[in-house]
Image (cartoon, rainbow, N blue to C red):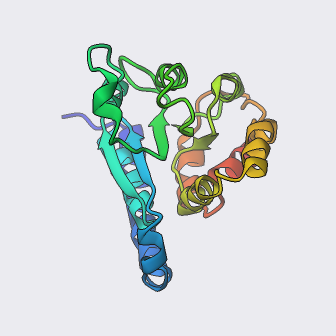
Amino acid sequence: MFVSFFDVIYLTSLFFILLSVSQERTMAVGDLSSSSSSSSSQELHVLAVDDNFVDRKVIERLLRISACKVTTVESGTRALQYLGLDGDNGSSALKDLKVNLIVTDYSMPGLTGYELLKKIKESSAFREIPVVIMSSENIQPRIEQCMTEGAEDFLLKPVKLADVKRLTELIMRSGEPQEEDKAKHSYPNRILQNNTDSSSSSHDYVSSVDDDTPSSKRMKLES
């Protein structure tokens, strides 16, 4: 089997992502143990959607480090099935389903993350659930499109622990009207200028792995 240079770069990058996540988990153990009694009653349930197995495991692990309950699915279609939005299932199955946050990759075969976002926002049962889009590409029109459609945030991969902590803290405060209004009207600050080249170079991808800067700030630095 032929392995290209970019395949080697990608696999190397994923190795460092998992290594970084492991180190972050070790540092977070102390904080989690001290607050486990209070977080258990406020545990957030996150639905994570990504067709890439490794990326799916990375975001799952980051969310679990942040004391979240995580359900993972490998496609937008499976996400709709889980939520009962695939057409045939009635709303009776949704009564006991509680999801606090949906995190989805943008580029997926079949139903894209953007299309999944639109279907969720069209649902009376789930339109209030925050949806966060992830992508390895920093493309301004794509970001604007998602934010205009109602996305809570747009994260640049690889997602960092700082991103997840910021999002979970935001969701925990979502019951406060002033925080919710601020989140809805502050998204232009998170929309970044488009890269001159729509595809990131392998060097940019590898260097971002070792950067602890939250992805929204990394996108600004890269623009």
Q: Farthest residue to the left: give it.
A: 1
Count the labels in the image.
0
Residue found 64% across the figure and 29% down from its top: 150
Residue 149 percent location from the top left of the image? 64, 23
* Left or right side of 55 for 210: right
- Viewer-closest of 105 and 97: 97
Which residue in the rendered view is the most extreme toward the top?
A: 87
Which residue occupies 54% across, 29% down?
A: 127
Residue 133: image quadrant is top right
- Can see residue 5? no
Q: 153 and 20: which one is in front?
A: 153
Taking the image as drawn, is residue 90 in sight?
yes
Q: In which image quadrant can residue 213 be found?
A: bottom right
Q: Please state the horizontal and vertical placement of residue 129, each as a whole percent of the image.
A: 53, 38
> Is residue 162 positioned above or below 144 on the image?
below
Q: Of 193 and 7, which appears nearest the observer?
A: 193
**Front-most of residues 109 and 171:** 171
> Residue at point 49% right, 80% down?
35
Work out whether 157 lies above or below 2: below
Q: For the C terminus, give its image quadrant.
A: top right
Image quarter for residue 52?
Answer: top left
* Left or right of 183 in this view: 81: left
Q: Is residue 114 left or right of residue 73?
A: right
Quarter of the image where the N terminus is located = top left
Residue 112 image position (x, y, % from top left): 45, 22
